[in-house]
Structure formats: C-alpha cells, structure tokens
Amino acid sequence: MIHVDLSLSRAEFSLKAQFELPGSGVTGIFGQSGGGKTTLLRAIAGLEPGAVGSLSVNGRCWQSESIFLPAENRHIGLVFQEPSLFSHLDVRANLVFGSDRGKDRKKNNKAPQAAVLEHICTTLELGSLLHRDPRSLSGGEQQRVAIGRALMASPVMLMMDEPLSALDHRARRTLMPFLEKTFQGLEIPVLYVSHSTEEVARLADHLVLMEEGRVTAFGSLGEVLGRVDSPLNEVDEAFSVFNCTVNNHDLPHLTSLISRGGEVLHIPRVDINTALPVRLRIRARDVSLCLQRPQQSSILNVLPAQIVDISEKIRQGSRSIKLNIGGETLLAKVSEYSVQLLELAPGQQVFAQIKSAALMT
Amino acid sequence: MLEAADFTAFTLTLKLAGVSTLILLCLGTPLAWWLSQTRTRGKSVVEALIALPLVLPPTVLGFYLLLALSPTGPVGSTLNSLGLPSLAFSFSGLVLGSVIYSLPFVVQPLQTSFVAVGRRPLEVAATLGAGPLDRFLNIVLPMSKLGYLTAIVLGFAHTMGEFGVVLMIGGNIPGQTQVLSIAIYDHVEALEYSQAHWLAGLLLLFSFLVLLTVYTLNKRASFLSGAGP
C-alpha cells in the first residue's frame, strides 16, 4: 500500500494531498495544468523539502513528523517531462548511473547488472544507442534512455511526470507502446502524472484526480471514472473505459470488438490483431439515451443498458448518468430537459447510443 | 639578454601564481558553490566583497593589507603574539595578497558554471541514489570542466601580472618577493631597456597564449560576457 498525507504551502499555491493506493499497478495522477500534480510527485520523490506530513510506500516510511528520507534514499525511479540525461556521459553510463549506486539495493537485487541492462535495452530498443552522446539523440530516444535509466536503478517505485508531453505527436505515438511494454509485468507501483485523458485511459489501473492542489477523487480507474459526481464532469472531461478484445474485421471499414460483458461494439476499422485486451475510451458527451432501440440510425453502437445512478447536480443544463452494460460502467451526459421528458430514473432499462469510441492503441 | 636575477624573478612569479591558484581553487570551489545555491540576502554582500579587487586600484588593496600585516596591525600583531614571523615583505604575504586580489577571477567563472549546471541534473542524480558529495563529484565537477579551466587560467594569469599589491606588501627582495612585473619596473628605472624588453615581451607572449587557450577552448561563451560555459 501507498499512504500519502502530504501538504506544502507556497506564496501562491498550496498542496494538500491525502490518499491511499494499492502497492502495485499504474496510478494515473490526472488534472489540469497548474493543479499541483507535478508538485505532488516531487513531494513524494523527496525533492520538495518544504513538504510536511507522512508518506509510506509498501511498509517503508519515507516521511513522518520526525523522518524525512532524502530522495537518494527513497530508491525511486523518476522520469521527468524533459529527458534530463547527463550530457557529460554517454548513453550506457547514463543507464548504469543508478545501478552503480546503493549497496543495499544490490544485495536485494541478485540479477547481475549486465543481464538487467540487456533486458532493458531489449525492451526499450536501446542496444544501438549505447555509445552515443545523449545530445545526439532524438527527443523520443532520449526519453527512452531516461526510462531505462530509472528502471536500471531497480527502484521500489517508478514515477513519471508527463513523460510524453515534451514530445511531438509522432514521437508520442512511438513511445506509447514502449510505456505499455515497460508497465507490463512490472511488479513495482507506477505513478504516472498526466493531463491527457488518452494516456490515462490507456495506461492507468488506478486514478488520483487533482484540482488546485487538492485531491478530489482517488480509487480504481473504473470506480473514479464511473462516479456521477466525478470532478471530471465539471470540465466536461468525463469518460468511461471499456475493456474489450478484438473480435473480427468481417464488415467493410469496421472492426468489431467484444466487451467483457459480451456486448459487440463496432469502431472504424483499425488494423490490429491481438488476443490481448484492448481499451476503448468513450466520452460521456458522446453517449445519448433512448427508451426504445432506434430502428434507423447512423449510430453504430446501440447497447441495452440499465440506469444505475443520476447526478444530483446539473452542470451546463446536463446531468451525468451512470449506466450498467453487462457489468461494465458507462457514463452518459444527458440534458436535464431530456431527463425530465423521458422520465429517466435509476433502475430503468434504456438503450445507450455511443456516437464515437476511441481505441486506445 | 636576461640575467640570473631575471630568471629568479621569473621562477618566483610562476611559483607565486601556482601556489595562489591552488589555494584559490580550494577556497573558490566551496565559496562559488555556496553562492550558486544560496538564496539568502547576504549573498549580494559576499558577491560585492569578492568583486572589489576588480574595481579597486591594487595599491588601495595593498595599502590595507600592509596595514593589517604590519607588526602593529591586526593580523601582524596576532602572528607576533603567537611567535610567528610577520607576513609583510615575505613570500607568504604575497600569496595572501594574490589570493585576495585574484579571488573574483576564480570565483566568478566557477559560480557561473555551477549555476549553468542547473537543479535538474542534481535532482535526477538524487533520485538515482547519489548523495550530495557523489552529486558534486560526479555531476557538478565534470559538467563544470570549462568553468574550472577558465578559473585556473584567469587566476594564474592575473596573479602573474600583479604589480600594485606586490609593490605595497612585498617590497623588492630578489628570490623572495621580487616578481616579474617588479623586475621590469626596476630595469626601466635603471634605464636597462633591453632587459625590460625581454621580460615585458615574455610576459606579453605568455599572457596572449593563455587568453588564446581560454577563448579557443571556451568557444561557447566567455566568462567576460557573463554567459558562462
């Protein structure tokens, strides 16, 4: 488990974060820019001397009233927004910088450095870059080295601060699969700061929502996203994630997917053939409700659903409605006018029309 | 041609510059590091004090040093009461004067290059398990190579060319305190122009080569323009 209860005051900003997370899996720390995500991450890393409170990670106390473990003793891997490679060292020396340090870690870590290095070079495709000057690498390559360098130190927790946001669109698309590959089979917890719903929908298992230096919600991805009072509704960012598997490409221009609940969904054709689960991100504002199944509609995905919850609050004339579709949660944003007209209420059977769904690949 | 006394002055000058530069590096490194990291208000006061020799006539500095080192001055009387020899008119006194006089030429390039390293590489190194000393030795020092080169060269060269301070506190004792610049002065006073020519030309050539080295190696930015390496 990760217990966080940290606060920090500055002249024009204050951070107050209190939450708990399971000790494994990827946690997305999500919020708008300037919301304190980076400061929270830095405080957890031990890089904010002004942070007070308590912090423990998987049974180890990093900070309390009497303890402040310096960053170098927290055994973390931190990947910053900018790759921040050491310019006076070549790629290989950058990679082994962390694994050369910390004797207590070496004792726990039986795998010899060479083997770990080889494994990381394979995963992140760094083999051909080892003797290069980091300044001669592209932004995406530099960030891969930075990720490898953090992992080489055999950290007890991996932290990433918007690792993709300093890259251009193409580099971002190329780096994403590397992140997924890295997170797969990783036993340590990962904290992933991002302001992109796409990255969170794709990578996170748990979610911490932040706003103006405060944690507004935390929990498993489905749990946080499925709340009708989720702060994400405030900024019209609410979305749901459907876990699916690729079914077939039988229909022209379409790819068919099967959700965990057994529902078939169609999306514009994507050339993907994998037996692994894939994620669909569906925005609440792209979901509308009908009482009867529409007979002639251009909308491809119409699924029978049951209303679970309706938000009490009306935002911009709309309520958010939580639906159950074969055990999966889907959020819909429906105007208050329609809620009254259709007399929508919890427990009711309806049909959810999904205008668009994005496959997170 | 040059006499034996001129060679003595030459080697004495090199020795003075070498010893002073070594001491300057030892003093300048922690001082420059502190200045590059601190945010206290006292920083400006310290910076101004260090920069004083840049604007003060060397004779002013030499005059105060002479007063301080004289047997009745604060430093001189303390040394006297401890049974130590007076520093005035001695090689050690010259070293002390040189260190003060050349301090800004060592501290400023070091400080500039420490600032240029930035916080980020140090934070990365900390998260990778490097403690403060480890970070300084393995991140700051290698990244400040050019700063050190500039500091060493400028400190050394500036000490070599020193005149006013030496004249005030060193006197003109051959083999002890008679450095090149004083020897040149003596030759001119005695109308020995050919020897003065030799020594002056030597110093000119040396200084030019030193500066050429610095500017060639330090192409990216010069300390004088304030951009730092």
Image (cartoon, coloured by chain):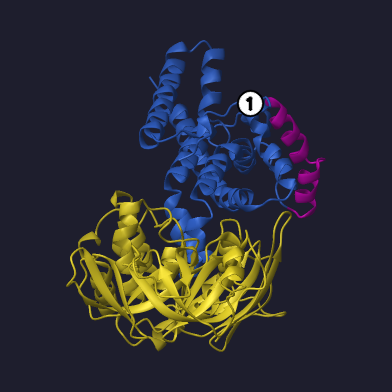
Chain colours: A yellow, B blue
Q: Residue at x 47, y 67 (%)?
A: A288
Across and down, in percent, residue A284 comes to 49, 67
Under circle 1, the secondary element is helix
In the shown orientation, is residue A361 left or right of residue B40? left
| Magenta highlight on residue B68 | yes
Across and down, in percent, residue A69 comes to 60, 76
| Front one among A95 and B93 | A95
Q: Residue at x 58, y 34 (%)?
A: B177
Q: Residue at x 59, y 26 (%)?
A: B163
Q: Is A212 placed above or below B99 here?
A: below
| Magenta highlight on residue B133 | no
In the shown orientation, is residue A54 left or right of residue B114? right
| Front one among A207 and B12 | A207
Looking at the rendering, which quadrant does residue A105 occupy? Answer: bottom left
Q: Is residue B171 visible?
A: no
Q: Is B227 placed above or below A262 here?
A: above
Q: Is residue A123 visible?
A: yes
- Which residue sits furthest right? B72
Query: Mark 1 falls within which chain?
Result: B
Q: Is A305 placed above or below B66 here?
A: below
Q: Magenta region: which residues? A: B59-83
| Front one among B146 and A76 | A76
Looking at the rendering, which quadrant does residue B200 occupy? Answer: top left
Considering the whole magenta stretch, tell me its main secondary structure: helix
In the shown orientation, is residue A236 left or right of residue A150? right
Looking at the rendered structure, the kind of residue marked 1 is Gly
| Disc 1 packing (10 Å; few <14; some 14–19; many ≥20) | some
For disc 1, the marked residue is: B164
Looking at the rendering, which quadrant does residue A248 occupy? Answer: bottom left
